[in-house]
Image (spheres, grey):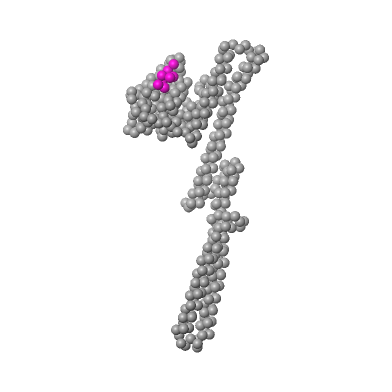
Amino acid sequence: MFKGLHARLSIVLILAASSILVIAGLIIMIEVHHHFMMFQKDVPEFKSIRPLTIHFERALLGSILWTSIGAIILVCFISFFVARNLSKPLVEMRKAAEKMASGGLDVRVKTIGNDELNELGYSLNQLASKLQFQETSRKTMTSDIAHELRTPLATIKSHLEAFEDGIFQPTEERIHSLKEEIDRLILLVQDLEHLTAMESPQFILDRKKVNLSEIMSKSMDTISGAYIQKGVKLEKDYRSFIGMNLDAKRITQVFINLFSNALKYTPTGGKVMVSAAEEKDSVLISVRDTGTGFPKEDVKQVFERFYRSEKSRNRDYGGSGIGLAIAKKIIEAHEGQIWIESELGMGTIVYIRLMK
């Protein structure tokens, strides 16, 4: 329909073109009349041909007038179609944006060519894709959080009901079991808080000149007791000093997470090796374990929130499934890279590359 943006563009084009034509026509008509008056003064024999010159002048001015009117009418038609072609993609984008606002994130606009309007359409499609991905991630995350909370809460509730009904006696072992479930809930909430903080626009690293080797050694000392208790060797292979500009607290959080994961998936008698090699402009760190590993098809998914290679979500094989997502956020905030190589039954290697 002829309304809105289409109407405004049409009116603007018609007024602009018509104004130019009217001004040009008036100037030509004034110039023609002026030259006829000069001709009348300069030619003595003008009286004998005056009827002819007057007729010629009127014919010429009339032609200019009717040509201008015809051009204005033509401009109206051309402006209508040009405005429609200009407004159509913008109207489609507006409708697409309205659908996106109402939740229809699968909407896309057609993009043909390389002009600014098509670039705008392409950007709108990218926005819709990202919003759709985020919405899917949000729903998945909500479902995963509900799943993670349901099991410990159900366990706690069933134990408390059993205590209340006198079916179970609140023995030390059962109270300890409840405490473990509560600890899982606390860790889950803490991990979610850390992940939310790192995804916030206000997240800023406190980077200082530190010794990376010292950070790794302290992280190993922190978790060494758990390794000794399980009977897994924790060894290191790196220089005593590797100077880096890092946020020591956040990097420590990454190492503790990686060492904990390696311990969970490494059986008694196994080994975890932590190495660091200085390169030209970076440091390559690796955490290699002799654990169970996981299928290659799962490698790309391990950094997703709540992902576990153990599909049954057996709690003997890890915590909330957020640790590696947090580690990835921290490393990327340091403009570094983190990736995993693993094969089922062959152990796992986590690589981190940090720029100097």
Q: Is residue 285 magenta?
A: no
Q: Quadrant of residue 70?
A: bottom right
| Above/below status of 65 relative to 354 | below
Q: Quadrant of the N terminus?
A: bottom right
Q: Residue at x 37, y 33 (%)?
A: 355
- Foreground of the two, 68 or 236: 68
Q: Residue at x 64, y 14 (%)?
A: 163
Magenta segment: 218-225
Q: Residue at x 56, y 36 (%)?
A: 136
Residue 78 visible to the viewer = no
| Above/below status of 142 relative to 34 | above
- Foreground of the two, 142 or 218: 218
Q: Can you give x and y, in whole percent of width and height, for residue 275 in the image?
A: 37, 24
Q: Is residue 219 magenta?
A: yes
Q: Residue at x 54, y 26 (%)?
A: 189
Q: Can you give x and y, in whole percent of width and height, for residue 269 in the image?
A: 43, 16
Q: Can you give x and y, in whole percent of width and height, for residue 276 in the image?
A: 36, 26
Residue at the farthest right position:
165
